[in-house]
Amino acid sequence: MARLPVLSIVAAVVMLGSQSTPAYAKPEGKVAVQWLGHASFKLTSAAGKVILIDPFITGNPNLPEEYKNLDKLGKVDSLLVTHAHGDHLGDGPVLAKKHNAPLYAPAVLC
C-alpha cells in the first residue's frame, strides 16, 4: 500500500483522472460518479480511469446483491481508503491485488 495523507485524496483523484489526457485536450467521455452504498464510491474519469473510494462492497448491507460481485465492477485503476474501519477499508486490499492497482491510504493504515 502506498502512503498518502488523507488531505491529498482529492489531489490524487484529479491527477489520476487526468493522467492520460493532456491538459489542453478536451476529454471524450464524461465523469461518472456511482454511489455503492455507505461511504463507497466508484468514480470514472472522462479519460476512463476508474477510482474506488472506501471500497466496502461485499459486506455492505446498503448495496444490492447484484453489485456485490467484485468481478462485475470492471477494471479498477486506483483505490483510495480514508481510514481503517472495516466499513471503509472493506475490499480494498483484495481489489488492489486483483487489478494490480495502487491502494492509497493514510500513513497509519499503510
Image (tube, helix red, strand yellow):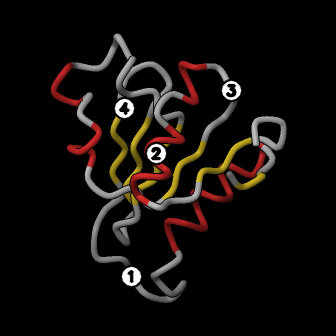
Give the amino acid at mark 4.
Answer: Trp
Q: Earlier in the sequence, mark 1 or mark 4?
A: 1
Q: Tell me, for residue 52, which label it has, or none.
A: 2
Q: Residue furthest left?
A: 66
Q: Tell me, for residue 35, which label it has, or none.
A: 4
Mark 1 or 2: in front is 2
Residue at 26 percent of width and 53 percent of height: 74
**In this view, 86 is above or below 109:** above
Give the amino acid at mark 3.
Answer: Ala
Q: Earlier in the sequence, mark 3 or mark 1?
A: 1
Mark 3 or 4: in front is 3
Q: Earlier in the sequence, mark 3 or mark 4?
A: 4
Q: Secondary structure at mark 4?
A: strand
Residue at 71 percent of width and 55 percent of height: 2
Q: Tell me, for residue 57, which label it has, or none.
A: none
Tag 1 residue: 26
**In this view, 31 is above or below 38:** below
Q: CA distance from mark 3 to mark 1?
A: 37 Å
Tag 3 residue: 84
